[in-house]
Image (cartoon, rainbow, N blue to C red):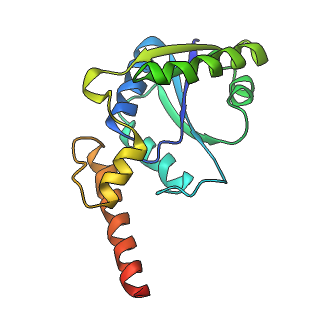
């Protein structure tokens, strides 16, 4: 059975992420979505929240599973018998960085990386940009799944209440 991993921080998961996951699911028998635990970064959502949101928005895809991981992605792959990493590429700048990572991962364990070009309608989309727009009151509907939009709006409301309480 050919298994691949789609890794990322997914903070928040966007429609661009979901497009890459769905396309990977058509290429492989099973896709594991791996949410990176990065203790040095304070995200909008906890790892547990991101995993749950991803599980909810991919629940209609029976060959997709979601879990978190720490450490090297190649170790995650080796522990689970995953032979390929699927990465979406938005632009040439993504390719430069991702090619280096792919070559290092192949050298470390032999795991291959498959690059999937981002669909044109999502080529500008990045989680960091979505967060920035949302935090400043911009409309990010249509860029994230409705469930994620609701969670983001709730987070922004809570942040505003916290700031008002401090003032």
Q: Is residue 127 left or right of residue 42?
A: left
Horizontal side of residue 162 vs 138, given as left or right: right
Residue at image x 34%, y 35%?
A: 125
Q: Quadrant of residue 5?
A: top right
Residue 52 image point, x, y percent: 47, 49
Q: Residue at x 38, y 52 (%)?
A: 131
Residue 4 visible in this rendered orientation of the protein? no
Q: Position of residue 61 (x, y in %)?
A: 39, 29
What residue is rendered at 44% in x and 42% in y? 54
Give above or below for 119 relative to 140. above
> Residue at the spot x=41%, y=43% of the render?
127
Q: Is residue 30 left or right of residue 101?
A: left
State the image coordinates of residue 6 (x, y, percent, origin top left): 52, 27
Question: Which is more toward the observer, 108 or 34?
Answer: 108
Q: Is residue 157 above or below residue 51?
A: below
The quarter of the picture where the N terminus appears is top right
């Amino acid at each position: 059975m050919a298994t691949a991993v789609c890794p990322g921080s997914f903070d928040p998961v966007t429609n661009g992420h979901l497009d890459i996951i769905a396309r990977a699911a058509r290429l492989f028998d099973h896709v594991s979505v791996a949410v990176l635990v990065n203790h040095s970064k304070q995200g909008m959502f906890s790892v547990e929240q991101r995993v749950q949101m991803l599980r909810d928005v991919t629940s209609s895809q029976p060959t997709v599973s979601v879990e978190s991981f720490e450490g090297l992605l190649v170790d995650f792959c080796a522990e689970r018998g995953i032979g390929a990493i699927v990465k979406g590429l938005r632009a040439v700048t993504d390719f430069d960085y991702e090619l280096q990572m792919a070559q290092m991962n192949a050298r470390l364990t032999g795991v291959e990386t498959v690059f999937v070009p981002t669909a044109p309608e999502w080529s500008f989309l990045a989680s960091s940009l979505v967060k920035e727009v949302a935090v400043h009151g911009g409309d990010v509907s249509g860029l994230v799944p409705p469930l994620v939009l609701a969670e983001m709006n709730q987070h922004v409301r809570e942040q505003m209440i916290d700031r008002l309480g401090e003032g």
